[in-house]
Amino acid sequence: MKMDRRGLLALAGTAALTGAVTAVAGPGAAPAHAATGTAVVDPAQRGPVWEGFGTALCWFAHRIGGTQAVRDTYADLLFDRDKGLGLNIVRYNIGGGENPAYPGHMDLRARIPGYLASASAAYDWSADPNQRWFLQAAKSRIPASEFLAESFANSPPWWMTISGSVTGGRNAAENLRPDSYEAFARYLVTVNERFRTTWGVPFRTLSPVNEPSAAYWTFGNRQEGNRMLPANQATMLKALADELARQGSPTRIAASDETSIDVGRDTVDSWSAQTRALVGQYNVHSYEGSDRTGFKTAARGTRIWDSEHGNGDASGTTLSQNILWDVKWLGASAFAYWQAVDSGGWGMLDTDLNNASADLSSYTRNKKFWAMAQWSRYIRRGYRVIGVSDNDTVAFHDEAGRRVVLVTVNTTSTPATVTYDLSRFAPATATASGVRTSGSQDLAALPSAALAGNRFTASAPAMSTTTWVVPSMTLN
């Protein structure tokens, strides 16, 4: 989310917030409807293999220092499956590092240190200790078979920019100096390889730009940002691919993390086949836009991540709706939230990262935390997305564990009843177990439901997320 949408939406009032939430819609921006009827699960409709749920570290990991006990508590709640959410994807921000001439530009939380202070400086491998600690803490809590890490940049180092600041270009101009594409690529890959070879954290992908087509990256902003339009993005991707090859890195390129699904679609379509061939994973953010199927078409079979989503709806309903849309229409194989720890309803653990005197050991688990748990605790890396006829339900098949996980999201004020039809699996004697988060429930266990003829019926209350795990599901 790098451009703080809390500030942007506050300027336009509550109506703007409502618009921001409803603008990010499924195909055709169809209105929400209660999930009443039959959801036929079809394992023959095979979607991508699911890779997981995650968060960017970045601001919150930089700010939460404190005692070991405090940091361990946050790490447990985010990355431990038994004690918390069990997130398995971590996005590490390679900071640019602001010009010391502008010490007051950025919010306290957004001041991510860089590793290279100037063109003549040596790399400072002691930089960014808090974010690096959280990365290692996540890795130690996530099973090795599930752990995935990605590095990303919001801006080049200040001395590679035209404006002399990591906050953006003057008048929202593109800000990477024309003579610094190779230098920026070298910086990113050198840091990337330090993590792999010295610190034991391999980044599978590296994204060199963040929301690059957006016009809000202007000099003096409160956070890092760098405008780079699609033609120059292609130049950057070529420089990065060359540098990855030069340093012998196995990391692949992810691109281009546009803020809008529709802009992301257009960016990918604008690139040549040669540029697209450099990209191993298409990242997009789901703050704006609605053409998920169009983005999926533009990706041409390359892996897709919703690499960043965030919203101020602490109820978790908007979160669940966006995950469902991404699974059903975008063809995403992963979902990463912007800041799992933040204030104002944006985080799942609510605390004020900008208050220098705040006790960050104090936090609140809001409904969004429990809504994420409905997904992340039960749907693990390696499960297969499969078809389901109901627009408010998604299904995943754990082929090795012979189980199906169903998630139904009801965003309306009307309760619903859903009959889950799993008759396209081999006949089974099984009992489904369920959990629900709603206005009155936090990952609450539900009465079990016995299957009859591979079917069972259950409620989907208003404004709720319900997860069912069905065992003994094998293919016919």
Image: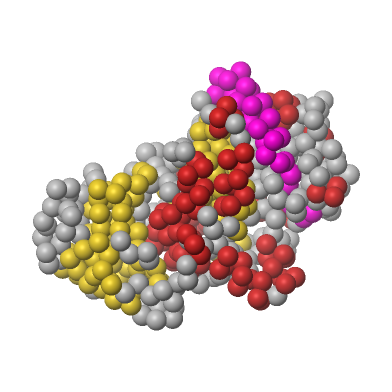
On the image, the x and y values in percent for residue 455 come to 17, 65
Kindly identify the residue that appears in the image at 11 percent across and 64 percent down.
453
Front position in the image: 200 or 159: 159
Kindly identify the residue that appears in the image at 44 percent across and 38 percent down.
301
Front position in the image: 352 or 303: 303
Give residue 109's quadrant in the image.
bottom right
Give residue 324's quadrant in the image.
bottom left
Vertical position of residue 188 compared to residue 449: above or below:
above
155 sits to left or right of 394: right
120 sits to left or right of 185: right
Q: Residue furthest bottom?
A: 414
Question: In the rendered image, which quarter contains the N terminus?
Answer: bottom right
Q: Is residue 406 visible?
A: no
On the image, the x and y values in percent for residue 57 come to 58, 49
325 sits to left or right of 385: right
205 sits to left or right of 8: left
Front position in the image: 24 or 383: 24
Vertical position of residue 351 compared to residue 271: above or below:
below
Kindly identify the residue that appears in the image at 33 percent across and 77 percent down.
416
On the image, the x and y values in percent for residue 22 come to 56, 68
Q: Is residue 95 rendered magenta in the image?
A: no
Vertical position of residue 248 compared to residue 50: above or below:
above
Magenta-tinted stretch:
221-249
Q: Is residue 223 rendered magenta in the image?
A: yes
Q: Residue furthest right?
A: 101
